[in-house]
């Protein structure tokens, strides 16, 4: 047998390398690095800021929305790290965008969460931006055409979810088309596309009613209500539940179409608010560059308690060290008439534990 042609080997390697770069559809999260800069000219829409080719066109056409897109990148990264602060996998790898480590490109549950949260943060931020008048492309959300029950009327300015969903889908899914504009059908692209959709669905489903009272001295004789989105924290928490219940899938050819189906025999399909993944996650206990695990050595943990942040679970049975740390803070603050606050400085001893 002939040894494989060197040229072929190099070409395969090149494709793999390019894919590691290109097959990341949340590169735009790297926009968080330029949070303070204004978007003034279409020349600002560059690939180096993290935008994919098709997103650059959206950027040029929607310069007035770009600082909102940047804001949503920051919100999704902060929320992800908050939600996973007491887990072995704590979402720290997301800070490395645009080059993501393996935990976020292999098709894992963690990747599913990151795609879901980024898509929902985008929809949430854009819908909100509409109602506060950031752009002329959208404004207040449409009011329900049902007659209100109870003593209120529709009014005020609701979040424009409709526009948020349209823009969000156009922006996130722009990364899932190839050069010619064809929808990508790799297993990874299908998973990412679905999880982007889950992010939008979770936001859409959480639209609720907010009201404001009018009338003499808080009597609330007149109430106006509108449709508003909840704080993004609650959406981050909802998606965390979806993460726990994520469905493992595989790809199958059905007639001439490729589809994702649950690997579990008892289930025929999954819903459009369920995150999906196809690669099992490691336990994230020790460092492993193949899976992108950084390990939990040195992580702080709870020496008492039963949560996932407790030392037994966080340190994977390797044990932990107790130590104390002195922190100084302002305390016993008093208001002095008029007009300042006087505080003492206290030192406190914190008892902490850290994984070996
Ligand atoms: C856009 O370009 C201007 C002028 O070159 C620059 O000052 C600004 O920081 C850029 N903004 C971004 C977001 O890159
Ligand atoms: C998250 O994990 C990384 C890696 O172990 C660690 O460096 C970082 O401090 C952790 N972040 C938090 C908020 O605990
Ligand atoms: C650390 O401190 C906790 C109580 O604060 C104690 O129960 C535990 O045994 C200590 N562990 C080690 C390894 O010193």
Image (cartoon, rainbow, N blue to C red):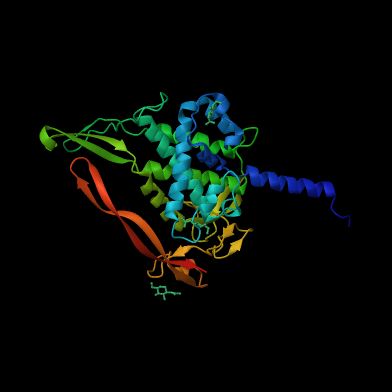
Q: Going by the image, does 338 lie left or right of 321?
A: left
To which quarter of the image does residue 126 belong? top left
Count of marks, rendered view: 0
In the image, residue 178 above or below residue 6: above
Residue pictured at 51% horizontal, 35% vertical: 171
At x 47%, y 34%, the residue is: 36
Q: Percent from the top left, x then y, of residue 209?
A: 27, 40
Where's residue 117, x and y in %?
46, 46
Along the viewing direction, whichever of 255 and 141 lies nearer the viewer = 141
Q: Is residue 205 visible?
A: yes
102 w.r.t. 145: above or below = below
Q: Residue furthest right?
A: 2
In x, y percent, where is residue 87? 46, 60
- In depth, the one of 88 and 354 nearer the eye is 354
* Residue at screen point 54% across, 39% down: 28
Residue drawn where x is 89% and y is 55% of the image: 2
- Location of residue 319 with respect to 279 vertically, above or below: below
Left or right: 110 as drawn, with respect to 258: left
Q: The N terminus appears in which quarter of the rendering?
A: bottom right
Q: Position of residue 302 (x, y in %)?
A: 41, 66
Q: Quadrant of residue 228?
A: top left
98 or 257: nearer the viewer: 98
**Do we see residue 51 in this rendering?**
no
Q: Is 12 left or right of 200, judged from the image as shown?
A: right
């Amino acid at each position: 047998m002939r040894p494989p042609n060197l040229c072929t080997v190099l070409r395969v390697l090149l494709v793999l390398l390019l894919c590691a770069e290109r097959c990341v559809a949340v590169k735009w999260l790297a926009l968080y690095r330029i949070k303070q800069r204004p978007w003034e000219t279409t020349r600002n829409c560059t690939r180096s800021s993290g935008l994919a080719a098709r997103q650059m066109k959206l950027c040029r056409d929607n310069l007035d929305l770009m600082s909102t897109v940047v804001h949503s990148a920051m919100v999704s990264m902060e929320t992800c790290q908050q939600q996973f602060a007491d887990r072995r996998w704590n979402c720290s790898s997301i800070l490395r965008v645009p080059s993501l480590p393996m935990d976020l490109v292999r098709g894992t549950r963690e990747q599913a969460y990151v795609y879901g949260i980024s898509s929902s943060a985008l929809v949430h931020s854009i819908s909100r931006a509409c109602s506060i008048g950031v752009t002329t492309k959208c404004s207040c959300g449409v009011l329900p055409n049902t007659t209100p029950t109870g003593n209120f009327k529709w009014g005020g300015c609701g979040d424009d979810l409709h526009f948020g969903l349209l823009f969000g889908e156009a922006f996130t899914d722009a990364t899932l088309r190839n050069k010619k504009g064809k929808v990508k059908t790799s297993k990874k692209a299908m998973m990412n596309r679905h999880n982007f959709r889950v992010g939008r669905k979770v936001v859409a489903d959480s639209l609720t009613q907010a009201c404001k009272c009018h009338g003499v001295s808080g009597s609330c004789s007149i109430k106006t209500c509108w449709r508003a989105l909840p704080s993004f924290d609650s959406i981050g928490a909802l998606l965390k539940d979806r993460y726990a219940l994520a469905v493992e899938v595989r790809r199958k050819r059905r007639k001439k179409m490729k589809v994702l189906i649950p690997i579990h025999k008892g289930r025929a399909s999954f819903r459009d608010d369920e995150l999906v993944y196809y690669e099992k996650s490691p336990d994230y206990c020790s460092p492993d560059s193949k899976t992108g695990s950084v390990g939990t050595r040195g992580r702080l943990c709870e020496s008492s308690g039963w949560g996932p942040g407790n030392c037994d679970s966080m340190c994977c049975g390797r044990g932990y060290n107790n130590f104390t740390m002195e922190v100084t803070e302002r305390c016993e603050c008093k208001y002095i008439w008029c007009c300042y606050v006087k505080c003492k400085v206290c030192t406190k001893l914190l008892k902490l534990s850290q994984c070996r």
